[in-house]
Structures are given as structure tokens and as C-alpha cells.
Amino acid sequence: MTVTRFAPSPTGYLHIGGLRTALFSWLWARKNNGKFLLRIEDTDLSRNSQEATDAILEAFKWLGMDSDDEIVYQSERFELYKKYVQKLLDQGKAYYCYMSKEELESLRETQQANGERPRYDGRYRDGSLPAVEGIQPVVRIKAPLEGTVTINDGVKGEVVFNWSDATDDFIIARADGTPTYNFVVAIDDALMGVNEVIRGDDHLSNTPKQIVVYEALGLDTPKFYHVPMIHNDKGKKLSKRDGATDVMEYKKDGFLPQALLNFLVRLGWSNKDQEIFSLEEMIQLFDPNNINKSASAYNYEKLIWLNSHYIKNTDNEHIISALENYDIDLLGHDKKEILLDLAKEKGKTLVELVDEVKKFVYFPETYNEKDCSKTVKENTFEILDKFMLELEQKKETLHLPNDYQEIIDSFISSNELKMPELGKPLRLAFFGEAKGPNLADSLAVFGVDEIGLRINKLRVFTS
């Protein structure tokens, strides 16, 4: 059974690159009827943030990417890790190192001066040096001193490391007894049954160290897929300015979860030229072996385009529910379907959609003065009053946009007007500016009574 995981550290927000890795892992598990697990890597007690943990879990809930088992917190497993440290000490596969910080720094300076790669020199490896009084030792694992290790990576193919270049006898337990990242990652993945690890390729250099842990403890090594980074349009590392921000900021900015997931799945993976994917299609088609070997480019305009598509194609019932988060209640609005279809034409995000809806729900607070001077002529209100008279006379028969369109056409024709002579002042009265949505649709949303009220408010403003 395929078991994948996502393992964020709660020292900051969940960013877009991390979410993409989580999505790839989640899709692969779902495709194979496997398990997707979530682990919070909170061993760094000095930097952990409960707020960050809560934000990570909130993001997964919003996106519907559920974990199949209880969430694992590394901070609750310190006693377990200590047992594995002791096991390696007892088996002679790890040892205490009493090297002081000053000694280690001096060694590194010497190695750098000699043009060598800074690395621990293994001086306590064979046990010939005595313990040092006053020094709380760290625990180091014995890494291979020669030969190579080959990783058959699902994205990068065969990757070969020389042991002498890839690692030294690295620390698995600090002086205070807390375990280190590469040690606990390997243990947790093995104990949780994770057999396929999809992660960013910034972790590739950690892989040989983790293989040292797997082999020392006799644990099965998972299949690795190291995914290239997301770059900005200039080929540089993604920054907050480019979009590498808290995932929940995307919700705040009015993006739909399905649009964000569709956007992310296309960053580094494709299915021919297909751009729009339902969640079911993502699960059916995704394969991490087809992830691109090169970095992908973040394109905000593509995200906006996708979000606009999903807004237009999301049924109004769900949109109404989403708008409640913005204190917009359309449940009782008798023309909510027409209103939302109009708003969807311009609202590319829920925030923009809210702005469009507010134009119909609230009266204009101000009017564009330039539009007023160009649009309101001596006979403007005479035309509007005459138009209102026809609306009043046929009020009982006016319900749909087509009903209003017939009135507009006949009124313009019988009064020998040009469309802007009626349309511009009406839009100015409705929206505070001389441009706006389709006129007949707008009239149908407002209804005869409110049309009259908005015209009169404009009259007062321009008088």
C-alpha cells in the first residue's frame, strides 16, 4: 500500500511550495487507495509556534486535504527517539563526542584554510579519546567512510553520492538530549509506514544522512521523489512578493481552494496541454514519476485566470455560502441568481466578487464627478422620469432581463434617443459611475421601486 506524508515544521507559515509538495503526496496516496499522513516536526522547542501549527491545520482543512491517521507530533516522541539513540550506542553504531564548540570551530577554520570541505574529523569515533570533564557530549552516528550510495529518485533518476562528500559522523542527539532532524525523520517515516517520500529537492542533500540512519537501525528505506523548486518569472527563488506567502492569505484574498489546487498541480507536472483539472481528474492522472526535472515558474496571472474560471463555474449556492464570510447575505434576495451571474463577469476573486455584489446591495456613497459633468444634461432627468413612468405602468409584467430589454428598446426607439442617453445616466444612478454591467440585467436585479430611489438620489446629488 502506498503511504505518503507531509511533515511541516511549525516555525512559520505554510507556504505555497510546501503546499504543492503536500498536494503531490496527497494525490499519489489517493490515486493508489493508500494513506496520506500528516506529521508536525516540532522538535525545535525554542522556535515552535502554536499559532503556526494551527495555521497549518487550518489550511489543510480549508483545502480538504485530510490526513488518514491521527496527526503525529514529534515533540511528543522524545522518549521514543532516546531509545533509538541508546540502541545505536549499545550496538557501537553511535558514540559520544566531547568536542567543544571552540575545537570544532578551530577545525573548520583549518580545513577552510587548506581548501578542504569543513567536516567533523571523527576523532572520538574509535573510543580512544577519554571523556572530557565539564563537556556535555553530543551523540554522533558512524557514517560510512568510503564508497558510494545510489538513490533511484523518482524525479531526478539515479543520483550517486560519495559517502566521503555526502556526510560525516553527524550529530543525532544534541548535548541537551534533543534529537536532530535527519535522525527523527528517518525513524518516524519508518515507524509510520511511509514508503514513498515526495519533497522539495532542497532535501536531496539530506537523503544520504537519512539512509545512514535507516541502515544503522535496519529500517526500510522509502522511495524518494525530489521535486524542483518554484521560481519567480525571473528564474529566482520565490519570495513573499512573488507569492510565497501564507497559504491562508490566498483564502483571505478571495481564492477558491479548488483553483489554488489546480494551479499548484500544474507547477511542475502536466497532462499534455490540459489546464483545468477537477479534483477527480488530478487523482486519476497524477503520477510523481512524471514531475518535471526543472524548476517551475510561478505565474500569478494564471492563478487569477483559474480562479475566475472556478468562480464562474461554481454554483451560486456555494458562492452565496462563501460570501457569508464577507458579511454578504444573499439568501433572501429575490434576484440573487441574476445578481451573481452579473458579478461573476468581473469578479475574478471572491474579494472582487464582493465588491461587485455590493454595487447592487448598497446605494452609491459617491458619484464620479467627471461622469456627472459629461452625462447629466439639461434633459437627463426628464428622460429618466419618462422612462420611470413606463416602468411604473408595466411594473406587474417586469421580472426578467428580457422584460426590461423590451422596455429599453421601445423607449429608445419611440423617443428617438441614442442608447448612451439612457444607459449612462442610469448606470451613474445605479453604480456611481457611467459604466457598469449589462443594463437590462441590472434593472431586473434592482426592480422598479429601487430604480426610482437610485435615480432620485442622483437627482439630489446633482441638483
Image (tube, rainbow, N blue to C red):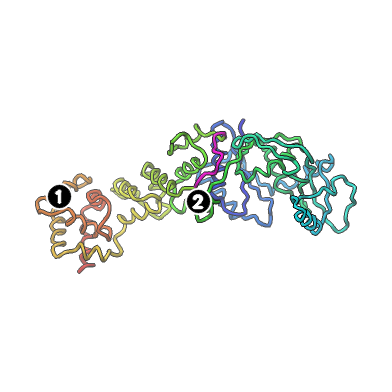
Asked if 114 appears above or below 144 in the picture, the reply is below
In the rendered image, which quarter is residue 108 located in? bottom right
Q: Is residue 178 visible?
A: no
Question: 202 or 233, which lies in front?
Answer: 233
Where is residue 78 shown, x and y percent of the image?
A: 73, 48
* In magenta segment, residue 400: no
What secondary structure is marked by label 1?
loop
Marks 2/1: CA–CA distance:
60 Å
In the image: residue 446, left or right of residue 127: left
Where is residue 333 shown, x and y percent of the image?
A: 31, 50
Where is residue 1 shown, x and y percent of the image?
A: 62, 30
- Foreground disc of the pair 2, 1: 2
Q: Give the residue drawn at x 13%, y 61%.
A: 382
Q: Which residue is mark 1?
A: 394
Q: Which residue is mark 2?
A: 234
> What range is drawn magenta here?
289-297
Amino acid under label 2? Lys
The C terminus, quarter of image: bottom left
